[in-house]
Amino acid sequence: MLLTLRRARRPENPVDRGCATCPMAGSAAVHRHGLTTEGADYVVALAGNPNTGKSTVFNALTGLRQHVGNWPGKTVARAEGAFLAAGKKFKLVDLPGTYSLLSNSADEEVARDFILFGRPDVTVVVADATALERNLNLALQVLEITDRAVLALNLMDEAERKGIAVDHRALARDLGVPVVPMAARRGQGVRDLVDVVARMATGELACRPHRVGSFEPELEAAVQRVADALRQAHPGLPNARWVALRLLEGDPNVIREALAGTLGEGAHSQILSIEEVGKS
């Protein structure tokens, strides 16, 4: 099972130290608030469902000095900030709060394109520990796209107040990525999240996330044919298999971009816009 919940006492150690494939050790990295985004060494995407405390996590990492605007060509708000860890500067991009990446709305399309085509160095998925079943839908979709993901298990204090205990170590083993228990509004777990992000961005921490296995032979053959055609038409396209699945599902936005030959171009303009903001 991917989810282990029990009514019990508070977990004896609130700090996750890694996943089954990548054990973690060592102290948390030092970080500072209020930096500009200029000259960042790494880009970190912050994703999550609405009302998970994602903005609180963002504020805890970046402090009060942030840039707020819209995504290029969208009315969707975008916030960016920066923090230091292990002597490196990290640009944090707060993605729109969404329940999935299936591009049924402008928010979902922005989040999907940035994670898939923008290829951030790390993607942090903020989840609500009191409603984990609902939040895992987005987390599993992110894990289908990228190996560089961390689950920030926020609102642990609320879960404890409601008598809910989450076995974050078992969850980390099942997901195959680090799980960091947090109560961001109290500052708990923030330093540990910074530590995990820094290790993953620098390549010190590598995981094998849980993904759906092969489909029925006929469907698997169709996925492979479409993926091969995508690689030929769009050299360098990241995760052609994921895009192929979206095409076979009939995702209208992905179909439109594939037919127009513009797959990933929107995310490229997002990256350029973010870089220009950092230089201004």
Image (spheres, rainbow, N blue to C red):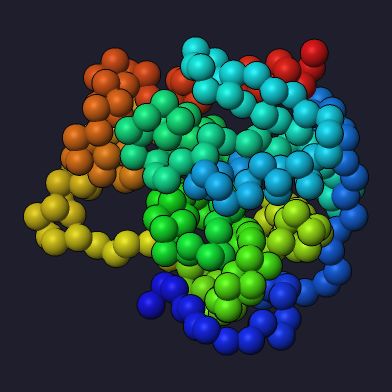
The residue positioned 90% from the left and 55% from the top of the image is 30
The residue positioned 66% from the left and 42% from the top of the image is 55
Q: Out of 17 and 146, give the one closest to the viewer.
A: 17
**Residue 18 in view (yes/no):** no
- Residue 123 at x, y percent in the picture: 59, 47
Q: Please determine whether, in this image, residue 60 is positioned above or below residue 128.
A: above
The residue positioned 63% from the left and 74% from the top of the image is 160
Q: Please determine whether, in this image, residue 154 is positioned above or below residue 269.
A: below
Residue 184: image quadrant is bottom right
Image position of 70 (left or right of 146): right
Q: Quadrant of the N terminus?
A: bottom left
The residue positioned 58% from the left and 73% from the top of the image is 162
Image position of 111 (left or right of 36): left
- Residue 143 at x, y percent in the picture: 46, 55
Image position of 133 (left or right of 273): left
Q: How many marks?
A: 0
